[in-house]
């Protein structure tokens, strides 16, 4: 259970105590991921089905690997290879998967709110693997876990998120989570990529990356989501990189022990340079490893109902 719900659809409605519980349980799961005996019986006899309507490398694989490490029957279906191409609708597709006795349904969809609609129509626990520009709760949880691993606590940290805030579900889930947990969150992007009214989420807004990065403890780069943009938000990617890209010189404006995160996929030399991706301050690889552990902790919690 997540709060009063069988489903994990977003961070917005997830109580702080449950965020903390997931983060605590992840430490145990990480030990398993890092061991030479990656096997538990936590999901033995349970079924996990993964239904993605959008492409994914990290999120999909980490759910599947985690589910298999916990001994579940885990299957993967992408919309492009399913009867969705024969015009079956979303609810019917989800119900078909549900009546195969699915315990956990992991879903990604291009439309904000799609997993919420599915959750109302299935018995399985639905976990949102990203819905449109809305939320990506498991990404925010793994980001928080990674920050805590390096910094000890989220409270009081200055976290600066730079990139396509307007189209980013990662930004939204991170803003909910980090502000709930007491971090000071700033966002930075061209004015056209800042949603109006976002200050109400408790963030400070910058349009100058060199001002935003000053004294940051955590710097998070986000991909420019060209596939969601209808054009005209900024001149081109070269111009974006020049004005907002995080490079070696700009990273020096942050604290000397600042860490760099990025949810991936990274477009090198656009939102961050290769130097920044590969430098000692980057924890982008750790985020990916932690993604397996956090999803194991979440799936274990999902069957507890
Ligand atoms: C993100 C996503 O799909 O929302 N990727 C991810 O899950 N790690 C971010 C992105 O696509 O840029």
Image (tube, rainbow, N blue to C red):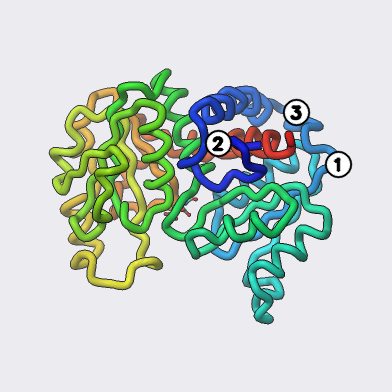
Q: Nearer the viewer, residue 29 or 104?
A: 104
- At a point 24% along the width and 55% down the height, the residue shown is 196
Left or right: where does residue 52 sit relative to residue 136?
Answer: right
Give x and y (percent) for residue 193. 25, 57
Identify residue for label 3: 37
Query: Percent from the top left, x then y, of residue 211?
Result: 13, 38
Circle number at residue 289? 2
Q: Earlier in the sequence, mark 3 or mark 1?
A: 3
**Place of residue 89 in the rendered image (x, y in percent of width and height, measured from the top left):** 65, 74
Q: Which residue is mark 1?
A: 45
Residue 120 on image: x %, y %: 65, 56
Q: Say which element carries label 2.
A: helix
- Which of the 4 image quarters holds residue 182? top left
Please identify the residue farthest to the top as the structure is shown.
152
Q: Residues within 10 Å of mark 2 (few under 14, many from 20)?
A: some
Residue 248 versus residue 140: which sits nearer the camera? 140
Rendered view: 252 above or below 67: above
**Could you tell me which quadrant the C terminus lies in?**
top right
Labelled disc at residue 99:
none
Q: Residue furthest front?
A: 4
To which quarter of the image does residue 281 belong? top left
Tell me, yes or no, if residue 141 can be seen here. Answer: yes
Real-space CA distance between mark 1 and mark 2, rounded to the nearest whole angstrom: 25 Å
Q: Earlier in the sequence, mark 1 or mark 2?
A: 1
Visible residue check, residue 275: no
Which structural element holds mark 3?
A: loop
Is 302 situated left or right of 133 in this image? Answer: right
Q: Are marks 3 and 1 in contact (CB under 8 Å)?
A: no
Residue beneath the point at 67% across and 34% down: 301
């Amino acid at each position: 259970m997540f709060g009063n719900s069988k489903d994990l659809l977003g961070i917005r409605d997830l109580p702080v105590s449950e965020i903390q519980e997931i983060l605590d349980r992840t430490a145990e799961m990480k030990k398993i991921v890092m061991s030479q005996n990656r096997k538990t019986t936590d999901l033995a006899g349970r079924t996990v089905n993964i239904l993605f309507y959008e492409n994914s490398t990290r999120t999909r694989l980490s759910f599947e690997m985690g589910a298999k490490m916990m001994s579940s029957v885990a299957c993967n279906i992408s919309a492009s290879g399913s009867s969705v191409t024969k015009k079956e609708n979303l609810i019917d597709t989800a119900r078909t998967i549900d009546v195969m006795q699915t315990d956990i349904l992991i879903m990604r969809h291009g439309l904000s709110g799609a997993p919420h609609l599915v959750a109302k129509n299935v018995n399985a626990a639905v976990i949102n693997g990203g819905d449109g520009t809305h939320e990506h709760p498991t990404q925010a949880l793994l980001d928080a876990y990674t920050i805590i691993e390096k910094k000890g606590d989220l409270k009081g940290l200055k976290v600066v998120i730079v990139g396509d805030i307007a189209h980013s579900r990662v930004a939204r889930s991170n803003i909910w989570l980090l502000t709930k947990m007491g971090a000071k969150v700033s966002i930075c992007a061209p004015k056209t990529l800042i949603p109006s009214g976002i200050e109400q989420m408790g963030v400070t807004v910058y349009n100058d990356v060199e001002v935003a990065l000053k004294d940051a403890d955590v710097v998070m780069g986000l991909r420019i989501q060209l596939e969601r943009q209808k054009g005209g938000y900024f001149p081109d990617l070269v111009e974006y990189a020049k004005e907002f890209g995080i490079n070696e010189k700009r990273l020096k404006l942050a604290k000397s022990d600042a860490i760099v995160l990025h949810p991936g996929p990274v477009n090198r030399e656009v939102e961050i340079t290769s130097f920044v991706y590969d430098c000692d301050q980057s924890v982008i690889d750790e985020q990916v490893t932690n993604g397996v552990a956090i999803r194991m902790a979440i799936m274990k919690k999902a069957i507890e109902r």
